[in-house]
Image (cartoon, rainbow, N blue to C red):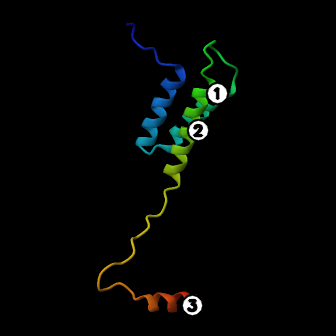
Amino acid sequence: MPPRVRRLFDKVLIPFHMACDQRDFEVAEKLLRVLEMMVDRGPTNPDGDRRRNLDGLVAAHERLWSLRHPTQPVSPPPVGPNRPTRSAIVRRMKRG
């Protein structure tokens, strides 16, 4: 079996993920622009990998966005004897 040849899109996507892993968002952004250009231009091969490239581009955008906008961790509700009573919670809610 001949060795699998990676598509150019995949060869650009790999360093994008490496830049994300290293939190180098400036490089990741520039590589993302290259990936966008590759999807936007006309097809260069008859196989029609546009859909697969588009899926990879969307995933790359989502990854970079989630790294730049991390969600604030939600602390779990208190449990045990130090937990506020139901009436204390209702009073706090009424005060607004």
Q: Secondary structure at mark 2?
A: helix
User: Label for residue 94?
Assistant: 3
Q: Secondary structure at mark 3?
A: helix
Spatial CA span between label 3 and label 2: 44 Å
Residues at marks 1 and 2, CA–CA distance in whole angstroms: 11 Å
The mark total stands at 3
Is there CB contact under 8 Å for labels 3 and 1?
Answer: no
Q: Earlier in the sequence, mark 1 or mark 2?
A: 1
In the figure, 61 relative to 56: above or below?
A: below
Q: Earlier in the sequence, mark 3 or mark 1?
A: 1
From this viewpoint, is residue 90 visible? yes
| Three-letter code for the amino acid on which mark 3 is drawn | Lys
Judge left or right: residue 34 versus residue 18. right
The residue at the point 52 percent across, 45 percent down is 64
In the picture as drawn, the residue positioned furthest to the top comes out as 1
| Residue kind at label 2, given as amino acid type | Val
Up-down relation of residue 38 to residue 21 (above or below): above
Residue 37 in the image: x percent, y percent?
65, 28
Q: Are marks 1 and 2 in contact (CB under 8 Å)?
A: no
Q: Between marks 3 and 1, how big is the CA–CA gap? A: 54 Å
Identify the residue at image location x=58%, y=28%: 53
Circle 1: residue type: Val
Q: Which residue is mark 1?
A: 39
Q: Nearer the viewer, mark 3 or mark 2?
A: 3
Which residue in the protein does label 2 denote? 58
Q: Position of residue 8 (x, y in %)?
A: 53, 20
